[in-house]
Image (cartoon, helix red, strand yellow):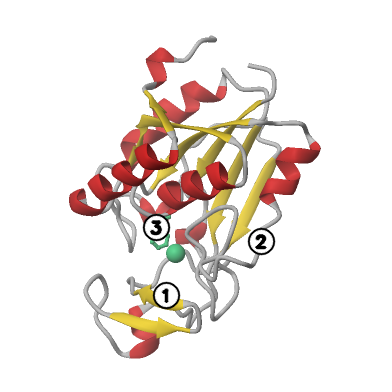
Amino acid sequence: MANAALLVIDVQQDFLPKGSLAVPQGDEVIPIINRLGGKFAEIAMTQDWHPAGHISFASTHGKQPFTDTVEAAYGTQALWPDHTIQSTPGAELAAGLDLPHAGLILRKGFRLNIDSYSAFLENDHSTCTGLAGYFREKSITDLYLCGLAWDYCVGFSALDGKQLGFNITVITDAVRGIDPKSMAEMSRRWQEAGVRTVTSEALPGR
Ligand code: VGL
Ligand code: ZN
């Protein structure tokens, strides 16, 4: 698969079952992603990487996670339990992840007042992470996405990647989500945008 890369989104301790923002069955993606790694010469990973007191933390605003929201400069921001705080164990990549040849680990969401679900564009939809330029400079046109979470960081990365001109395929068995309703809504948006979905067994290679 020349011109292709595997993009592994936010497979971090805090998103695993014992983490502070646990994605149900989030750990199940790890062996699947490790196996996928062997099929790709190019791998990039992302790491959600928030400062303490981040705008997306309910605790910052004295509000409730999951249900309350705040109005950010860029629109409505969902609120979460404190998670993936910079340089804490919860922000580390999942212990079982084994992708030694990954060339890039990109951090996102490190600005105090802007969240970033997408690996390409922060939630203000204008601040770039630089990831599109990284892939373009390497003549990578086809991105295969996996990781956490279906309805947030994987979901918006797929939509933005497609919008930015990449061929986007989500490897669905290598993704888990937070909420079944928002997962269904995200799947609808993928379909509408022309984001492809496959299962890992359907991919060629080792
Ligand atoms: C994520 C919510 C907040 C994700 C990150 O990785 O999907 N979701 N921060
Ligand atoms: Zn986050």
Give the residue displayed 74% in from the left and 47% down from the top.
Answer: 133
| Ligand 1 positioned in quadrant | bottom left
Give the image location of residue 191, x and y in percent: 36, 37
Question: Considering only vertical position in the picture, is 169 above or below 127?
Answer: above
Question: Considering only vertical position in the picture, is 186 above or below 48?
Answer: above
Residue assigned mark 1: 56
Give the CA distance from mark 3 to mark 2: 24 Å
Looking at the rendered structure, which numbered label has been put on residue 128? 2
Residue extending furthest front? 192
Give the image location of residue 36, x and y in percent: 50, 23
Tell me the amino acid under the disc marked 1.
Answer: Ser
Label 2 near label 3: C-beta < 8 Å?
no
Question: Considering only vertical position in the picture, is 166 above or below 22?
Answer: above
Q: Secondary structure at mark 2?
A: loop
Give the image location of residue 88, x and y in percent: 51, 65
- The reply to whether the residue tagged 1 has its Cβ within 8 angstroms of ligand 2 is yes
Give the image location of residue 10, x and y in percent: 48, 50
Tell me the amino acid under the disc marked 3.
Answer: Asp
Q: Is 123 left or right of 14, judged from the image as shown?
A: right
Give the CA distance from mark 1 to mark 3: 15 Å
Which of labels 3 and 2 is toward the front?
Answer: 2
Residue extending furthest left? 181
Q: Residues within 10 Å of mark 3 (few under 14, many from 20)?
A: many
Which of labels 2 and 1 is toward the front?
Answer: 2
Give the CA distance from mark 2 to mark 1: 18 Å
Q: Which residue is nearer to you in this view: 19 or 131?
A: 131
Q: Secondary structure at mark 1?
A: loop
Q: Is 181 left or right of 139, judged from the image as shown?
A: left
Looking at the rendered structure, which numbered label has been put on residue 25? none
Label 3 near label 1: C-beta < 8 Å?
no
